[in-house]
Amino acid sequence: VFPPLRIIARRLAVAALLALPSACDRGAARVPPGSAALDDFGDTVAVLPAPPARIVSLSPSTTELLFAIGAGDRVVGRSTYDSWPPAALARTDLGPGLRPNVEAVLGVRPDLVIVYASEDNRDAVRRLRAAGVNTVAYRLDRIADFERVTLSLGAITGDSIAARRTVDTVRATLDRVRAATSGLRHPTVFWRLWESPLLSVGGGSFLNDLLEIAGARNVYAELPQPSPAVTLEDLVGRDPDLLLTGPTTRERVLREPRWQSLRAVREGRLLVFDTAIVNGPSARVGESAVRLARLIHPGVLP
Amino acid sequence: VPPTRWVLLAAALVLAAIGAVMLGTLHLAPGEVVQAAFGSGTPTHVAVVRSLRLPRVLLAMLVGAGLGAAGAALQGATRNGLAEPYLLGVSGGAAVGAVIAVALRAAAPLVPLSGFAGALAAVALTLVVARAAGGRGDPRVVLMAGVVVGAFANAAIMVALANVDANAVRGALWWMMGSVADASWPQVRMLGVYVAVGIAVLLLLGRAIDLLALGEDAAAGMGVDVGRVSVYVYVAAALLTAGTVAAAGLVGFIGLLVPHLVRAAGARTHRSIIGASALAGAALVVVADLVARVARPPAELPLGAITAIIGVPFFLVRLRRLA
């Protein structure tokens, strides 16, 4: 006979209590006092005495960062969307990086797992830690996040000096771009990310940061989302000076009658910038700022 | 239907259309609309009226007319007030087609075409399943077959979407929620042909549907080939629905709601129910799209959600009357 619900509930509660201490112990015992910072889930980042030897990175920008600070040869697993550097493609593909298959991740025997700090990943982080694997979650969305995450990654992987050098190089490049464009007129820009629905770069995106550094003003900077949906009519009302699109869509936009309602399109001011090769606010973000500034202000930064 | 009601209906449609062309992020005066439509005025006004709003409003009209007429004919032929175009498995099939195109990373313009193919395949499957079950003209069997095909389509969608890029998923979901935001003149011409042919066929079948509505035995006694007429109605309705789905995604509730409103307003013969449903559906979708466009700038609301939000209260009132 099936036991009544009350008894099942009690058994489950007891089982949960029994399981709890072991999970907590493992996470807590690994934090040496004084060397901890918080990750973007607000959890303590455990810095182990021996640097990790087998790293899984489940987001494109952290994978790029790991290679940039010299930890690339220790990366054993990556997400499907990781595309830079080319050597990263040789690592095991562990899926799209959100709600990862925990068994597949454990299958490559990692001693450090880095995930994107999305609510979708909370459960996986909990289970990986319960399995005794040091796991860290970063929300690397804006250029302002870049220095913090890079230095934290450097501390965990034992590559602090290289991480500091990466941060300094990127900062110097961004400062150089900012200085070169600050005196110029900043054109208003619409940056088109997706066709249907029409998605723009919004104020919450590192691409918005890049636009400002490269000497332009995003017409949708006031929207907080990274890629808000907008309408063509609203865009007509904002009358941008320039359009930025991907490499395959420029000709189509120029031909389509609906897009003729924009002054920038009628006057042919469409610039091509491939977001696929930018890969988030990572180690090449300085180079991206240089390319964007040269595109918007020809002749600057020769 | 008395002639005054037809005039009122047509006037409502024309007013809705004029309002929809005038209103938006840029408010245009009637004079400016006329000027722009004839190609004078500022280049921005001309482009907004001619290539943004006119095709959009016309596409919304055609979508509403097609769904309204298809719903009216299906409810008559199946003698079931819950029959609606999407119940034939059309929506599920269209969604599967669209999602497969997205999962294969096809270019954006191919997504609706693939959706159209999926819709036709689903209707064919529904009719084959119904026939295999032995109920060629039996409306209950056809509706159940449609539900089963729809459930299978849902499962296929979830499998396909599980591992697709987030932006592509967003695109597919947006398309499924219904929108005429990307309307263009070629789309208007294409759907115009579908809707004109589909509604003409349904109007021709109107007398036979009247007899079907009396019951199958009665209709057969009066010389109607029940099975054949039903299949004609299903195929014409499916073509109308698949055409609207390809142009605008899934715009819910119109096919279900509008025929009820039209019958409540006094239409009795199926020719008039189908014709009036086409006009009323057109007006309703134009208004719903106007709301979708201006409710929350700079973003847009999904058209399918607006039609449902408008439709549910109407339907509840109608249900109370019926019960």
Image (spheres, coloured by chain):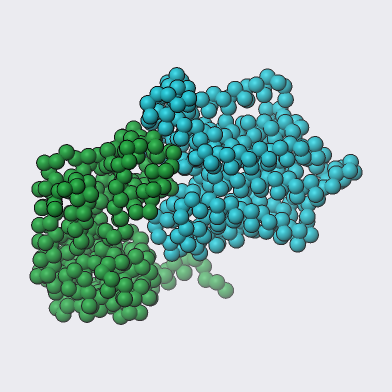
Chain colours: A green, B cyan
Residue B4: x %, y % from top left: 68, 19
Q: Residue A276's spot in the image, x, y percent?
A: 32, 59
- Image quarter of residue B58: top right
Left or right relative to A205: residue A154? left
* Residue B86 seen in this snapshot: yes
Is B10 displayed left or right of A158 in the figure?
right
Q: Is residue B195 left or right of residue A191?
A: right
Total number of numbered labels? 0
- Please tell me whether residue B71 is drawn above or below residue B127 in the rendered image: above
Residue appearing at x 29%, y 62% in the figure: A116
Identify the residue at image location x=41%, y=47%: A252
Q: Quadrant of residue A265?
A: top left
- Residue sitting at 50 percent across and 58 percent down? B101
Location of residue B93 (image quadrant): bottom right
Q: Is A245 drawn above or below residue B297 in the view shown?
A: below
How far across and down, in percent of the image, does residue B145 sit? 69, 57
- Residue B296, can we see it? no
**Going by the image, does A62 lie left or right of B178?**
left
State the image coordinates of residue B211 (x, y, percent, origin top left).
82, 39
The foreground one among A181 and A101 is: A181
Q: Nearer the viewer, residue A5 or A293?
A: A293
Q: Residue at x 63, y 25 (%)?
A: B9
Name the quarter where the C terminus of chain B is drawn.
Answer: top right
Q: Quadrant of the N terminus of chain B?
A: top right
Q: Nearer the viewer, residue B309 or B296?
A: B296
* Image: B185 above or below B265: below
